[in-house]
Image: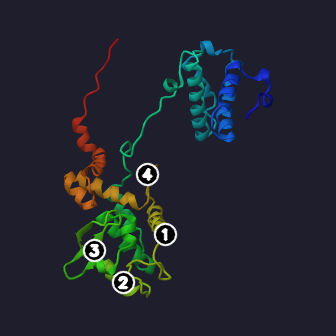
Amino acid sequence: MISQNNTKNNSFSKEYFEYLEYVNTLNIKEESKDWRLKHIRGFDIYLRANDIDFQNLSKLDVYNYMDSISSLSSRTKENRAICIRMFLDFLHEKAELEINGRETFPTIVCTKYSTIPSYYVDEEIREVINSVDITSPLGKRDYAMLLILTTYGIRQKDLINLSYSNINWNDNKIIIIQSKDNEVNEFPLTKEIRYALLDYLKNVRPKSDLPYIFLTQDGKKISSGGCYNIVNKYFKKANINIGLRHHGVHAFRHSLATSLLTSGIGIDEISAVLGHDDVSSTEVYARVNFNELKKLSLEVPKWYK
């Protein structure tokens, strides 16, 4: 239990101590109780220092406080807002405060469909591939891996598990058995990928009894982390302006879907290429087709006083 003796009674408001007593009744860890309280202490001190009482507290007062702590880290400010929201809700439910925390700090509900997937345009993808030194043994391997990822948009695990049995050299086909659902997806083996694979397999692949096509330099299976590091290495080497975009294997999958959509390929066809069971999983990419979305945009009206 957190005691009032741990603070100076004249340093905090009666509302703070009411909340302290309430928090002590909650069935949560002591660390969680202290976390809730420590983030409202500064808020309480700020209000008292500016002669603001809770009876007259407004949203603007709360926002002014948040502005006053703008130099703190984003994580600290986020935690401060969460704790103040709970504090304000507590006082509102006790009819001691007109405003409440939920309206002062509204929560935005996000789902996996709420954000636009990270993707790269065709020119950026080509720059990544061109950054590979195909004269070196590792470069030959990495070049073939990147070509497969960018051409077929397969998942990282499916690339790692790609085996000799998945390549039909006679019919120029590559068969992907998706690890996610065991569905079989068949693609045409392009000349560029065929030659890259043959160059790697005949000339530099380590000798190994493992069935996997792509191996580490010492003949072991490539791990998920290793695969990510390979991709990330060439994003950096190509000097791609990543910004806030993801730059792992899945970014190639998103980029392929976006490129196909921009080229006018239908959602159903893209869904088949990506091996989605449900077309709704593919529809998330429709939001990045900005050229088509612009056609649906409306003029913003001019408002006059």
Q: Are marks 4 and 3 in contact (CB under 8 Å)?
A: no
Tag 2 secondary structure = helix
User: Which of marks 3 and 1 precedes in the sequence?
Assistant: 3
- Residue where numbered disc 1 is placed: 226
Answer yes or no: do the residues labelled 4 and 2 have beta carbons within 8 Å? no
Amino acid beneath label 2:
Leu
Residue at 32% over, 82% down? 198
| Residue drawn where x is 20% and y is 82% of the image | 170
- In the displayed structure, would residue 50 be above or below residue 221? above
Secondary structure at badge 1 equals helix
Q: Which of marks 2 and 1 is in front?
A: 1
Q: What element carries label 3?
A: helix
* Disc 3: which residue: 192
Mark 4 and mark 1 lie on one chain; the one further toward the N terminus is: 1
Instruction: Decide: is 224 above or below 136.
Output: above
- Camera-near label (3 vs 2) is 2
Is the residue marked by circle 4 packed among few (<14), some (14-19), or many (20+) residues within 10 Å?
A: few
Task: Measure the alpha-carbon separation of dots 4 and 2.
Answer: 33 Å
Circle 2 packing at 10 Å, graded few (<14), some (14-19), many (20+), is some
Please state the horizontal and vertical placement of residue 273, each as a whole percent of the image. 24, 61
Snapshot quadrant of residue 254:
bottom left
What numbered label is drawn on residue 201? 2
Point 34% across, 78% down: residue: 163
Residue 78 on image: x %, y %: 57, 36
What percent of the width, then of the height, locates residue 3? 76, 31
Disc 4 to disc 1, how far (Cα)? Answer: 20 Å
* SS at badge 4: loop
Q: Residue 245 has which mark?
A: 4
The quadrant holding residue 208 is: bottom left
Q: Residue 183 placed where, x, y %?
A: 27, 65
Q: Earlier in the sequence, mark 3 or mark 2?
A: 3
